[in-house]
Image (cartoon, helix red, strand yellow):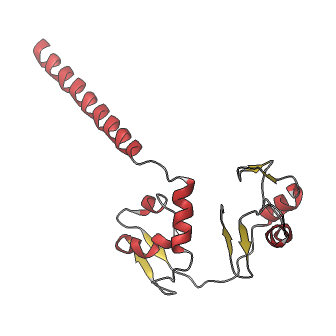
């Protein structure tokens, strides 16, 4: 009986070790893929800014269609959707108003966010960091520090240049 218990215990220890090994290998593999840098994201924006969608309203996209979505979902984030059974239901575009809490935060914290010399936000708490009027003024005012953000009636794009 003692030999049988030893064999069971050895099997249990081996199972725990093998499970631990798979977890460690999985963690190491996950760390091999670095997060995209600011430059990677900027390059992705510049490359895909004018890309028209290759899908239509009402279409259901699956894992096989991820390349159609790459221009619209940031690098590495799209990889989170690479699994069997994923579905994207394409809906008509339209005007979607921000959540009331976001609008309240924008009003409450407006005016406290500043742009540092390196382009980082300072003093940002919540909501839209800059009013659209200030963004447009900074873009068009001669001698002003460019915020690198341009807005139109239909879109907002950010740039670090």
Foreground of the two, 69 or 100: 69
Rendered position, 50 above or below 29: below
Foreground of the two, 156 or 161: 161
The structure residue drawn at horizontal position 49% and vertical position 77%, both measured from the top left corner, is 89
Quadrant where the image shows the C terminus: bottom right
Rendered position, 33 above or below 75: above
The structure residue drawn at horizontal position 49% and vertical position 59%, both measured from the top left corner, is 77
**Residue 110 visible somewhere in the drawing:** yes
**Residue 1 visible somewhere in the drawing:** no
Whole-percent x, y for residue 44 in the image: 51, 66
Whole-percent x, y for residue 103 in the image: 81, 65
Q: How many marks?
A: 0
The structure residue drawn at horizontal position 65% and vertical position 61%, both measured from the top left corner, is 160
Rendered position, 93 above or below 73: below
Quadrant where the image shows the N terminus: top left
> In the visual, does 158 lie left or right of 146?
left
Whole-percent x, y for residue 156 in the image: 69, 73
> In the visual, does 108 lie left or right of 91?
right
Quarter of the image where one finds residue 45? bottom right
Foreground of the two, 16 or 104: 104
């Amino acid at each position: 009986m003692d030999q049988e218990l030893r064999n069971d215990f050895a099997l249990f220890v081996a199972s725990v070790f093998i499970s631990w090994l798979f977890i460690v290998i999985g963690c190491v593999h996950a760390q091999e893929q670095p997060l995209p840098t600011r430059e990677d994201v900027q390059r992705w924006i510049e490359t895909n800014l004018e890309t028209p969608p290759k899908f239509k309203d009402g279409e259901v996209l699956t894992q096989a269609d991820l390349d159609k979505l790459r221009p619209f979902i940031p690098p590495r984030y799209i990889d989170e959707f690479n699994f069997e059974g994923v579905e994207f239901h394409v809906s008509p575009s339209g005007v979607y108003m921000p959540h009331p809490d976001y609008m309240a935060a924008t009003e409450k914290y407006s005016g406290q966010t500043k742009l540092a010399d390196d382009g980082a936000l300072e003093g940002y708490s919540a909501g839209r960091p800059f009013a659209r009027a200030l963004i447009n003024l900074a873009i068009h005012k001669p001698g002003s520090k460019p915020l690198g953000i341009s807005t139109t009636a239909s879109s907002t794009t950010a740039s670090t240049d």
